[in-house]
Image (cartoon, rainbow, N blue to C red):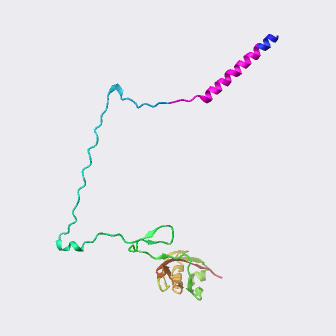
Amino acid sequence: MSHILNLRAASLAASALMVGAAVLAALTVSYSVQIRAAEPPFGFTFWSEPPPPPEPARRRSLTPLNPDAREAIQPFEPPPLLPSAGFGVSVAPSAPLGPVIIDRPHWLERPSRPERHYPRRARESGIEGVAQLDCLVSVAGALDCVVVAETPADWGFGAAALRIAREYRMAPATRDGVPVEGRYRLRLPFELN
């Protein structure tokens, strides 16, 4: 019986030694892979002709038709760029600049009694509404507006909003400290009290 136990212990030790050697071999083995270029089939060799060299660029003469006007031609220089208010974007001074968008107006005058412009037919019918205007603000601060939307339509809220907008005065927008035209979206609600 002891002989069988010794045999099994030796077998177990040999198996453990084999597994350990296999693990050690697996951890230390490195593979090298060589990639060879594919050879053309049937032993053919393909030759490609090198591309022809580029032709030299031809220089065009900028000689004016009138030889006396030669001094009048000046080389083009791009306009200097002005730094913007952040974001690293520059604007050429010759570029047409549109009106400045005004998002926080400073009101100089407001209508004293805007309710007097409430559309009569809408008031008598108990209808409330809203008018949205797109206004061009002059350097003097006057608003020149057009109706963008009115809800509900055909109750006169747009026309009433235009009458009210004439009574507003706003501090003009400025660009580099100089008053300029601006653009402002004016929303006028019409509510019954």
Q: In which quarter of the image is residue 106?
A: bottom right
* For residue 78, above or below residue 4: below
Check the picture and name the quadrant holding the N terminus.
Answer: top right
Query: In the drawing, does residue 90 fall left or right of residue 12?
Result: left
Query: In the drawing, does residue 144 fall left or right of residue 43?
Result: right
Query: In the drawing, does residue 133 fall left or right of residue 2?
Result: left
User: Is 102 inside the magenta-drawn segment?
Assistant: no
| Closer to the camera in the image, 79 or 126 | 79
Instruction: Look at the magenta stretch and give its main secondary structure.
Output: helix
At 76% from the left and 15% from the top, the residue drawn is 8
User: Is 9 inside the magenta-drawn segment?
Assistant: yes
Query: Taking the image as drawn, is residue 133 in sight?
Result: no
Q: Farthest residue to the right: give it.
A: 1
At 43% from the left and 71% from the top, the residue drawn is 91
At 33% from the left and 26% from the top, the residue drawn is 43
Provide residue 147's location: percent of width, then percent of height.
49, 77
Query: In the drawing, does residue 76 fall left or right of residue 164?
Result: left
* For residue 142, above or below residue 2: below
| Closer to the camera in the image, 180 or 143 | 180
Q: In which quarter of the image is residue 23?
A: top right
Provide residue 164's location: percent of width, then percent of height.
54, 84
Q: How many labels does the image show?
A: 0
Query: Taking the image as drawn, is residue 107 in sight?
Result: yes
Query: Magenta segment range?
Result: 7-32
Check the picture and name the quadrant holding the C terminus.
Answer: bottom right
At 50% from the left and 80% from the top, the residue drawn is 173
Provide residue 30's location: percent of width, then percent of height.
56, 30
